Image (spheres, grey):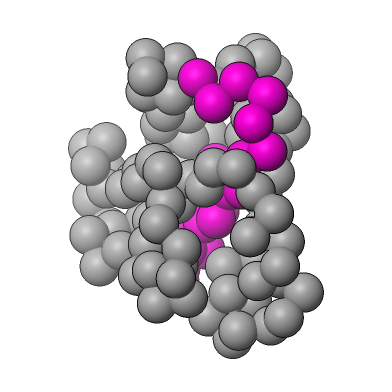
Amino acid sequence: MAEEVKCACGRANVGIFACSGSSNVGQIANKIAIELTKQKVGKMMCTVGIGGRINGLLKSAEGTERLIAIDGCPLNCTQETLKLAGFSPDRHIVISEFGIKKNKELELKAEELEEVMKKIKKLLQGT
Ligand code: SF4
């Protein structure tokens, strides 16, 4: 988790939104957003604030140059929330597409998290 990753977005002001859903994959999405923020790929922002149309949070999202949406599963709550508020994510990541089956387990497995993080880093570097 400590390894630095450079996103292809370069120095762009990147907003990272995660679903933080009540499932293993939702919580992985949340944790990945935190890790990408720590690694300075972008800055995690409040998805639920976008859903609630909170003015300051909408303005912060408008101030970004690129948006990354991270969803746990194909219901795509983050992407849909952003779209309903008029934003188009530049990257959309779905955790369950990395071979993790959605379940109700909220305790994250370190090895699973590490594996997903590796794949996402590769994905972001490859564009
Ligand atoms: S995308 Fe899936 S995991 Fe995330 S909040 Fe929606 S239903 Fe839950």
Q: Nearer the viewer, residue 7 or 22?
A: 7
Residue drawn 27% across the image and 36% down it: 98
Outermost residue, bottom side? 52
Q: Is residue 28 magenta?
A: yes
What is the x, y in percent for residue 103? 30, 62
Q: Nearer the viewer, residue 16 or 102?
A: 16
Left-right relation of 118 to 35 = left
Q: Quadrant of residue 91?
A: top left
Residue drawn 35% across the image and 46% down it: 92
**In the picture shown, does residue 14 fall above or below 7?**
below
**In the picture shown, does residue 34 fall above or below 88?**
above
Left-right relation of 14 to 125 = right
Q: Quadrant of residue 63?
A: bottom right
Outermost residue, right side? 56
Q: Which residues are magenta?
A: 8-35
Residue drawn 68% across the image and 24% down it: 11
Number of residue marks: 0
Q: Nearer the viewer, residue 97 or 85?
A: 85
In this orientation, does residue 93 appear?
yes
What is the x, y in percent for residue 80? 35, 70
Q: Nearer the viewer, residue 74 or 28?
A: 74
What is the x, y in percent for residue 14? 62, 40
The C terminus, quarter of image? top left
The N terminus, quarter of image? top right
Q: Is residue 11 magenta?
A: yes
What is the x, y in percent for residue 117? 48, 28
**In the picture shown, does residue 116 fall above or below 24?**
above
In this orientation, does residue 77 appear?
no
Left-right relation of 6 to 37 = left
